[in-house]
Image (spheres, grey):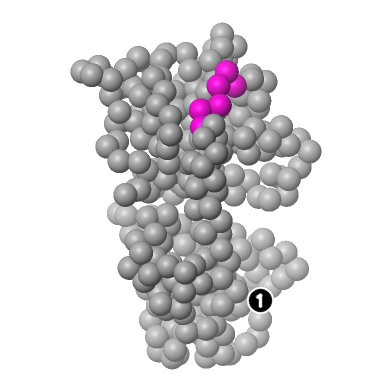
Amino acid sequence: MYQKIIANTPKFLMFDLQPLTENKNFIFGADYILIRPKQNGCILHLSSTQTPLVVGQLVLLAPFNPFKINIDNNKICVGDVLHFRLNALGQTFIDSVQFSKIKNMLDHAKQGLLFESEWLDPLFEIMDNIENTFDFKQLLNILMLLDQLTKTQPSQILETHQLAFSTTKRTENRIDSVLQYLATNLAEPLTVTIVAQQLHMAESTFSRFFHTHLGVTFRQYLIEQRVKQAARYLVSTDWSIAHIGAEVGFSSLSNFNEKFKTLLHVTPRHYRANHVALRENIDHSQSIQGQVQKQFHQWQTEAVL
């Protein structure tokens, strides 16, 4: 059974630095992962390969690349694991010419890349300066780290087994498929049964699959997406609150009000009044998107505390 690894730092948006630890089961990382062993003794398992990790190496893994770390005999596994994601940068930045080399490297990381060279010392210095803070310089450290890594050729592609690579790709495709289906059918009476049928999966299998790879239950994810879309409509349209609730799939106005207030700590009516200034940027949907995302991050942090 695969498990999903979740970053530990509250408000994790761009990166999270964690200690390298042993995990008994294969896990799916929802983010890019950079592994740096600081002591010999760790063994990296991908779906069809085993690689002893030694000091002086870096391993780059793409999202949904299943892996686990074991300790060799009675040795100690010491090192860093840097989780990072790209969506905080924005699609325009990711698609820019300046970012193309990094993007190309990350695309190849789907098969696992092992770097081993004397030229890695500058990267290790950058990693030593990375801290789990929200200073802007930390974002610059991540970008410099990735830029430096593009200048070093990987010494080994870890996952060459085509079947394993195809399995990982199918998992990604399934996740993308179900999320796209939910995004375009929020107004419909969506249930586990209905969505499971889209993937030709049994209900119980789908529920486990969804929770494993998304980190939340199907029901919770659906409610969050409906509230997010409702928040966008409250700012960008003059529709009535009842109409918006129905448009995003809530069965009644009272249910809509309840779920909206639970997640954003304010009623739909007050949310609209508090964010009416965003209408000045109505042609810039990223402004609305960013504000809604900020509200959800605040709610998630409060939920953790």
Query: Is any part of residue 27 visible from this angle?
Result: yes
Quarter of the view holding residue 122: top right
Q: Residue furthest top?
A: 118
Residue drawn at (30%, 54%) of the image: 305
Q: Nearer the viewer, residue 17 or 249?
A: 249
- In the image, is 153 to the left or to the right of 133? right
Residue drawn at (36%, 35%) of the image: 68
**Is 154 above or below relative to 132?**
above
- Please state the horizontal and vertical placement of residue 29, each as a whole percent of the image: 44, 44
- In the image, is 278 to the left or to the right of 59? right
- Please state the horizontal and vertical placement of residue 223, each as a whole percent of the image: 43, 73
**Is 9 above or below relative to 206?**
above
Quarter of the view holding residue 54: top left
Q: Magenta residues, as a range?
A: 154-159
- In the image, is 36 to the left or to the right of 95? left
Q: Residue furthest left?
A: 74
Tell me if mark 1 has few (under 14), some (14-19) or many (20+) residues whose alpha carbon lies within 10 angstroms of its own: some
Query: Is any part of residue 81 visible from this angle?
Result: no
Q: Can residue 157 be found in the magenta stretch?
A: yes
Q: Residue furthest right?
A: 97
Q: Can residue 245 be found in the magenta stretch?
A: no
Residue under numbered circle 1: 236
- In the image, is 81 to the left or to the right of 116? left
Q: Nearer the viewer, residue 238 or 273?
A: 238
Q: Nearer the viewer, residue 278 or 61?
A: 61
